[in-house]
């Protein structure tokens, strides 16, 4: 039989010296800070930066270590080699003073990177012509006409754009994507100087090639509301002048058109019809070729 000692066991007690522990933690943190990898690369978000307006803009630069990890951008120093063109009010910020190209160098420690800032200040905009799109059409790049102080066209732009009615047109990736019939505007801000572009979306409801016999009549219903119609005759057909376009039960205005076209804008009802006829006498030989296109508008 095993005997036990008469001395009672006591629990083990640890005594923590919090002051020494805090000093030790600080030493570890200081060691980690001094062993953090130094920057291996400075990588600008873009090597070329275009500016069109008077507003201050950002010069974004990533600081990477040798493993490609992102480090803190604190301590970046920026300098402009062409100070008369661009001003650097704060680290990572720039503002154009006049037209021209300026080189900007950014440094941290022994690392350096260069950027090219292209100052293309807009003095004025050209007439904002209507951008017309069709439902189902491929995305379209908006057309901007702008001039510098000398009256020369500007062909490099940088700005932000928003569409007023995203149910009519979606603006994504710098392109206009037509969605439904209607009208809206694209508002564009080029760093403190702004403009807008009117955008219209229509739906091509009729696109019909015609080959009519003498005296033949063809009809199509007009969309309710606004519509546009073009009867284009075959200019190679000497009999093309015999094709005529009429509109029944609609309020229409005829537009000036090319000699081989008949162009109408109409406001239709449920009873409105478009009528194309070959005005030659019934029984005359041959046929007359053309094309009718009709768009629903809003």
Image (cartoon, helix red, strand yellow):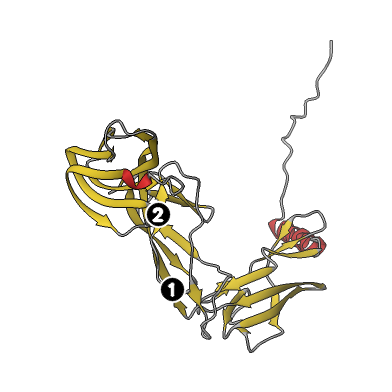
> Mark 2 Cα within 10 Å, few/some/many (few <14, many 20+)?
few
- SS for tag 1? loop
> Is residue 76 visible to us here?
no
- At x 37%, y 49%, the residue is 201
Left or right for 261, reference 224: right
Residue under numbered circle 1? 126
Q: In this view, which residue lies farthest toward the front?
A: 284
In the displayed structure, 150 sits above or below 20; it is: below
Q: Quadrant of the N terminus?
A: top right
The reply to whether callout 1 and callout 2 are in contact (CB within 8 Å) is: no
Q: Which mark is residue 132?
A: 2
Q: Position of residue 137 (x, y in %)?
A: 46, 44
> Mark 1 Cα within 10 Å, few/some/many (few <14, many 20+)?
few
Q: Position of residue 228 (x, y in %)?
A: 30, 48
Q: Nearer the viewer, residue 191 or 225?
A: 225
Q: Nearer the viewer, residue 179 or 254?
A: 254
- SS for tag 2? strand
Q: Nearer the viewer, residue 280 or 270?
A: 280
- At x 34%, y 48%, the residue is 241
- Answer with the quarter of the image where residue 207 lies: top left
Left or right for 93, reference 202: right
């Amino acid at each position: 039989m095993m005997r036990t000692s008469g001395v009672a066991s006591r629990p083990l007690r640890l005594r923590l010296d919090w002051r020494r522990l805090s000093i030790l933690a600080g030493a570890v943190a200081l060691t980690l800070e001094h062993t953090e990898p130094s920057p291996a690369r400075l990588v600008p978000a873009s090597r070329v930066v275009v500016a069109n307006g008077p507003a201050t803009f950002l010069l974004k630069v990533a600081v990477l270590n040798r493993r490609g990890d992102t480090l803190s951008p604190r301590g970046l120093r920026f300098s402009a080699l062409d100070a008369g063109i661009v001003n650097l009010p704060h680290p990572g910020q720039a503002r154009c003073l006049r037209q021209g190209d300026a080189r900007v160098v950014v440094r941290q420690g022994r690392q350096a990177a260069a950027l090219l800032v292209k100052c293309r200040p807009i003095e004025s905009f050209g007439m904002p012509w209507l951008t017309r799109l069709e439902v189902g059409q491929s995305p379209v790049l908006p057309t901007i006409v702008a001039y510098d102080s000398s009256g020369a066209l500007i062909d490099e732009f940088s700005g932000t754009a928003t569409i007023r009615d995203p149910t009519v047109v979606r603006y994504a990736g710098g392109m206009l994507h037509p969605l439904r019939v209607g009208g809206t505007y694209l508002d564009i801000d080029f760093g403190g100087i702004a403009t807008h572009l009117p955008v219209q979306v229509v739906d091509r409801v009729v696109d019909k090639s015609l080959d009519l016999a003498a005296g033949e009549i063809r009809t199509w219903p007009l969309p309710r509301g606004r519509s546009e119609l073009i009867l284009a005759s075959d200019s190679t057909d000497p009999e093309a002048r015999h094709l005529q376009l009429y509109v029944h039960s609609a309020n229409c205005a005829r537009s000036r058109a090319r000699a081989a076209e008949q162009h109408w804008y109409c406001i239709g009802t449920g009873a409105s019809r478009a009528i194309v006829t070959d005005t030659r006498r019934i029984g005359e030989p041959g046929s007359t070729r053309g094309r009718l296109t009709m768009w629903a508008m809003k």
